[in-house]
Image (spheres, rainbow, N blue to C red):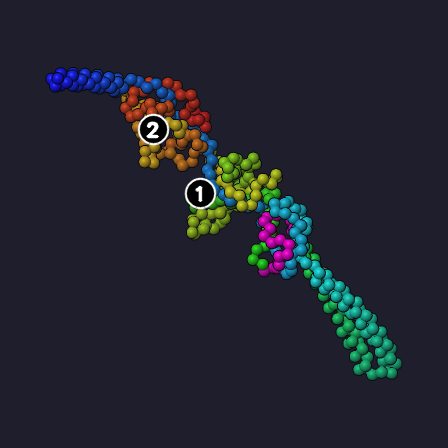
Amino acid sequence: MMKKMKSIARLSGIAFAAAFSGLLTACGGGNQQQMGGMPAEVETQKVVLGNANLEESYPASIKGRKDVEIRPQISGFITKVCVDEGQMVSAGQTLFIIDQVQLEAAVRSAEAAVVAAKSQVATAQLTANNKKALYEKNIISEYEYQTAALALESAKAAQNQASQSLVNAKKNLSYSVVTAPFAGVVGSIPNREGSLAGPSMAQPLTTLSDISEVYAYFSLTERDVLRLTEGGSCSLAQAIAKMPEVSLQLSDGTRYALTGRVSTVSGVLDQSTGSASVRALFKNNNGMLRSGSTGNVLIPQPSQDLIIIPQRATYEIQDMKYVYVVGDSSKAVARNIKVSPVDDGKTFIVTEGLSVGDEIVVEGVGTAVKAGTVIKPKAAAAPAAAQGEEKK
């Protein structure tokens, strides 16, 4: 019985070894077939020169043409808030009303003081006229006449003072009605009815923004400024005048419908950042853009005679970019390239590593095609310079 079981085990081992050997032969045959150079039919294209109209992107913060903090010029309790946050208001529209009771009482008191002063002037005028007639008849002394004349001047001065007090009282009363200095959008309103307001309050009543036009602020490096002025061969004003219209990419990635223009570049570089502040102006007819928003200013950078390749033709190893060039015997050869940091998301501008006339693989990179793969080229669906014209 033991001999029979050993025989069965021996036969099973032989069968397993035969099956494993057959599997290795099959796998080896497949590898030999792949290494034997079965051509990979993939798209390739010749490297040519082309033109590109790319855009450089700069992070930007958006502010209204005017952003003004609204503060009261007098102290008092807020009795009425006449607008709401985010509301569009016109110039002169009432925003807040501050307690007017004491201010109205001050106006009435000042008006009464003016009436009293006018009466005193009238009385002093009569006295002075009478004294003058008596003095001219030598009935009274010059001293009495001069005393009456001085009393008239004093009464007139008191009237002027009372009139000025009335003007100030009315002005203070007008300050109790806080109005919009220009048309714009109302910001947040931290203080409501019953809150004490004053000129020195920590928070303003609100912030009013004129957003009929908006400014997009961004920064240019010192190198960018030198490039803009062509190494100092022209002034900043001349360089700004020659700049093309710029676009605004919103925070959600969409592009604002209207283009703008760069209006100013600061003449002083920030020593902490080494950059210059730049301001681009955009129309905001529908009021969509608001102060405090963010986005990216896109500046066109047209260039000519560039080597432009599809991004799908590249792969990365340790932050270094490579392409497969069809070399001798139609085999794929890996080649390191350097590209411009500015791209459109679909193509790369190659600055080093490729020459006109090189043939590169644009399909199956890293999957069907690896270093040493024999290539059977087929025509690419798109030209090498996807964004430009092929240079003959």
Alpha carbons under labels 1 and 2: distance apart: 30 Å
Tell me the residue that label 2 is attached to: 323
Mark 1 crowdedness (10 Å alpha carbons): few <14, some 14-19, many ≥20: some
Tell me the residue that label 1 is attached to: 224
**Element on which disc 2 rests:** strand
Farthest front residue?
1
Check the image and report above or below for 191 versus 130: above
Give the amino acid at mark 2.
Answer: Val
Q: For the magenta stretch, what is the residue range?
A: 180-200
Check the image and report above or below for 275 versus 122: above
Instruction: Describe residue 295's horizontal placement relative to residue 317 as left or right.
Output: right
Query: 7 or 153: nearer the eye?
Result: 7
Identity of the residue drawn at 52% across and 38% down: 250
Helix, strand or loop for the magenta stretch, by majority:
loop
**Place of residue 129 in the rendered image (x, y in percent of width and height, measured from the top left):** 85, 75
Magenta stretch: includes residue 208: no
Identity of the residue drawn at 45% across and 28% down: 387
State whether residue 25 appears in this view: no
Identity of the residue drawn at 67% across and 55% down: 79
